[in-house]
C-alpha cells in the first residue's frame, strides 16, 4: 500500500515537472470574461448613430448651426462639420463587415464626435438640440467601448476591433498551433530521461485540451452565438500551462511552436477584452 501511494505521489510530482517544462515564458492570468458585442449588434448601433446624428442636426439651434466657431484645430464651419460627420458615419456603416472592423472609420467618427462633445459642453444645457446630442453622445460612448476606448476620446487614443470572422480564424489558428506544439513538445520530452511515459502523456493531454477549447470557440463564433465563456476557457487553460513554467527550457522547435500559438491567443484576448498574459 505504501509503495502504491509513493508511486502516485511521484507520478503527480513528475506530471507537475512536465507541465513546468511546457513553456519558459512569464506566467500570466486571464481577467474575468465579459460579453462581446457581435457584428450584427454593432451594425445596429452604427445605424442608430446615423439616425441620431440626423435628429441632432435637425433640432440644433439654427444660429449655432450656421456659425463659425474656433476649435482646437482652428475655425470650424459647424454646418459643414456636421455634413462631414454624416459622410463619415455612412462610410463606417458601409465598410464595417464580418471581415473588416473598420477601425480607421470608427476613429474618425469618434474624433469628430469628441470635438462636438467639447463644443456642446460650453453651451446652455437647454439649447435646442442639446437633448438630442446627449442621446447621440451616449451611443458614441457605446461605440467607443466596441473599439476598446472611451468617449470623448483621450488624447492620442487608438482604436481596434476584431470582427466575428477574424476571431473565428484566430481560434482555428490556435487549434492548428496546438497540434504543432504538441508534436514538438512530444519530441522534446522524449529526449528527457527524467520524464516517464505517463507524465509525458499527461502534458500532451493538456495541449489536446487547449486544442478542443480553441475548436469550440471557433464553432461558437461560426454559429453567431455569445462566446465569452469559450474564450475564457481557452485563455484560462493556456494560462495554467504558462503558469507552470520554470527555468527548464524545451527544444527551440517547441518554443517556436508555442510562440506562434501565443499570437493567436493574443487575438482572442483582444477580441474579448481579456488578459492573455501579464507583462
Image: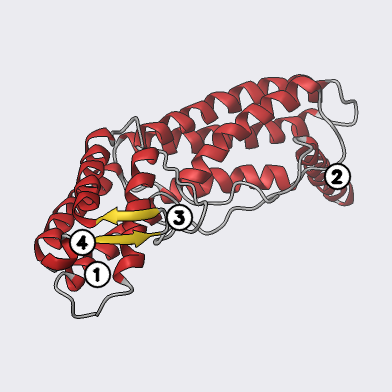
Q: Where residue 149 is drawn, which disc sits there? A: 3
Question: Which of label 2 and label 3 is nearer to you?
Answer: 3
Residue at the location (22% across, 35% down)? Answer: 94
Location of residue 218 with respect to 251 vertically, above or below: below
Q: Are marks 1 and 3 in contact (CB under 8 Å)?
A: no
Whether residue 143 is visible to the viewer of this picture, yes or no, is no
Q: How many angstroms separate mark 1 from mark 3 (CA)?
A: 19 Å
Q: Secondary structure at mark 3?
A: loop
The location of residue 33, given as percent across then percent down, is: 48, 56
Above or below, comparing residue 94 to residue 152 in the picture: above
- Residue 240 visible? The answer is yes
Residue 204 percent across, percent down from the top left: 67, 31
Disc 4 or 3, which lies upstream in sequence? Answer: 4
Across and down, in percent, residue 80 comes to 21, 49
* Residue position for label 4: 67
Identify whether 101 is placed above or below 255: below
Question: Distance of mark 2 from mark 3, alpha carbons?
Answer: 50 Å
Residue drawn at 24 percent across, 45 percent down: 84
For marks 4 and 1, the one nearer the N-term is: 4
Question: On the image, numbered disc 2 is attached to which residue?
Answer: 10
Quarter of image, res 113: bottom left
* Mark number, residue 134: 1
Of residues 118 and 7, the one nearer the viewer is: 118
Residue 233 is situated, as x and y percent measured from the top left of the image, at: 52, 47
Of label 1 and label 3, which has the lower sequence position? 1
Residue 151 in the figure: left or right of residue 177:
left
Amino acid at each position: 500500500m505504501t509503495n502504491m501511494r509513493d508511486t502516485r505521489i511521484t507520478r503527480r510530482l513528475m506530471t507537475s515537472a512536465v507541465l513546468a517544462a511546457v513553456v519558459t515564458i512569464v506566467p500570466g492570468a486571464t481577467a474575468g470574461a465579459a460579453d462581446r458585442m457581435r457584428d450584427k449588434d454593432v451594425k445596429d448601433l452604427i445605424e442608430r448613430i446615423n439616425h441620431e446624428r440626423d435628429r441632432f442636426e435637425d433640432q440644433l439651434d439654427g444660429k449655432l448651426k450656421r456659425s463659425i466657431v474656433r476649435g482646437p484645430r482652428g475655425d470650424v464651419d459647424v454646418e459643414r462639420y456636421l455634413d462631414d460627420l454624416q459622410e463619415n458615419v455612412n462610410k463606417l456603416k458601409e465598410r464595417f463587415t464580418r471581415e473588416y472592423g473598420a477601425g480607421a472609420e470608427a476613429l474618425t467618427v469618434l474624433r469628430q464626435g469628441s470635438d462636438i462633445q467639447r463644443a456642446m459642453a460650453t453651451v446652455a444645457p437647454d439649447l435646442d438640440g442639446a437633448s438630442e446630442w446627449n442621446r447621440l453622445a451616449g451611443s458614441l460612448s457605446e461605440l467607443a467601448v466596441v473599439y476598446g476606448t472611451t468617449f470623448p476620446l483621450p488624447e492620442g487614443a487608438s482604436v481596434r476591433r476584431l470582427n466575428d470572422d477574424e476571431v473565428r480564424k484566430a481560434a482555428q489558428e490556435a487549434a492548428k498551433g496546438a497540434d504543432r506544439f504538441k508534436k514538438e513538445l512530444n519530441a522534446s520530452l522524449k529526449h528527457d530521461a527524467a520524464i516517464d511515459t505517463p507524465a509525458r502523456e499527461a502534458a500532451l493531454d493538456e495541449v489536446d485540451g487547449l486544442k478542443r477549447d480553441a475548436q469550440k470557440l471557433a464553432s461558437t463564433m461560426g454559429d453567431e452565438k455569445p462566446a465569452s465563456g469559450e474564450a475564457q476557457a481557452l485563455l484560462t487553460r493556456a494560462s495554467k500551462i504558462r503558469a507552470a513554467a520554470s527555468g527548464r527550457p524545451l527544444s527551440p522547435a517547441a518554443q517556436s511552436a508555442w510562440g506562434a500559438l501565443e499570437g493567436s491567443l493574443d487575438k482572442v484576448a483582444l477580441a474579448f477584452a481579456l488578459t492573455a498574459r501579464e507583462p
